[in-house]
Amino acid sequence: MKTWDERVKEVQEKCKLVRRYAFEMTVEVEGGVHFGPAYSLIDIVGALYFDIMKFDPQNPTWEDRDRFILSKGHGCAGLYPALALAGFFPLEDLKKYGEHASFLGMQPEMSVEHGIEASTGSLGQGISIGAGVALAGKIDKKSYRTFVLVGNGECNEGQVWECALASAQYGLDNLVVIVDDNGMQCDHESRTICDMGNFADKWRAFGWEVEEIDGHNIEQLLTVLSDKRMPKNKPLVVIAKTVKGKGVSFFEDNNDWHHTHFVTKEMWEAAKADLMS
């Protein structure tokens, strides 16, 4: 059995690889890529796929597997390399990202055999899909957990709060929602678009257990996402403070890189230096 330090280090090292593969996968894609939203979520996804979740990539439809749904689907460039490293498909397939009819679309398209549990992209809807999956698990008396990652800007959507209300009413203590709280959305800082105020208080008011952490701190992620921390008879939300574009110096907190396709040779070399350090 691995020690705590070994678990943390393994996840950290694999997250570095995910960032590197994400850049290599996307840098020459035509039509633009959501770099910023993808890089802020990589440590969260890494903690789930490289330590927390139970699944079998050789038996991807295993009924008792934990489920992950990326509700902020535009960040999928940070998810696909993690799925490849977790064994759902060969790393070589990352070259298919964005190709016509590829299973690695610019937004996630349901392909359970490749680890993609739901089609997402219309903001606010992935969390409702996750709540439905969690409710089905309780009805069927299954032990799996359902994890949903939403964006802070996505929480402007009314459907998020309708789902929050219903999830508490049904006592979905097998549902974990993680808010990738990088403080920005496509146009500007989130507080200037639609200020959500105190996120934690809002979720508590809807009947949820709340944890607030640094979304790039692997130790904190592994601790709060452990099944031992699940509350009884209510869902859990983890508000993870993140940095948009985390890992590439000129991406970080720079909304010019929310979605772009302009990567010069000099930028590529600078990013490569950041990602290889």
Image (cartoon, grey):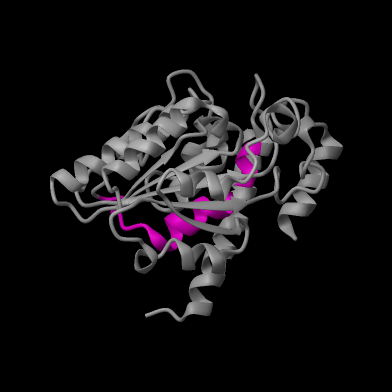
Residue at (15% x, 44% y) in the render: 139
Observer-nearest of 201 and 127? 201
Q: Number of callouts in the render?
A: 0
Q: What kind of secondary structure does the magenta stretch mostly adopt?
A: helix
- Asked if residue 248 is among those painted magenta in the image, a careful observer would answer no
Image height check: is 197 above or below 274? above
Residue at (42% x, 27% y) in the render: 125
Residue 130, position in %: x, y? 35, 38
Residue 176 shown left or right of residue 181 in the figure:
left
Report the residue that reaches farthest toward the front.
205
- Asked if residue 50 is among those painted magenta in the image, a careful observer would answer yes
Residue at (48% x, 72% y) in the render: 7
Residue 46, position in %: x, y? 51, 55
Residue 130 shown left or right of residue 277 in the figure:
left
Residue 123, position in %: x, y? 50, 26
Residue at (65% x, 50% y) in the render: 242
* Any part of residue 117 in sight: no
- Looking at the rendering, the stretch of residues picked out in magenta corresponds to 37-58
Residue 144, position in %: x, y? 25, 53
Image height check: is 170 above or below 49? above
Image height check: is 47 above or below 5? above
Observer-nearest of 76 and 155? 155
Image height check: is 189 above or below 224? above
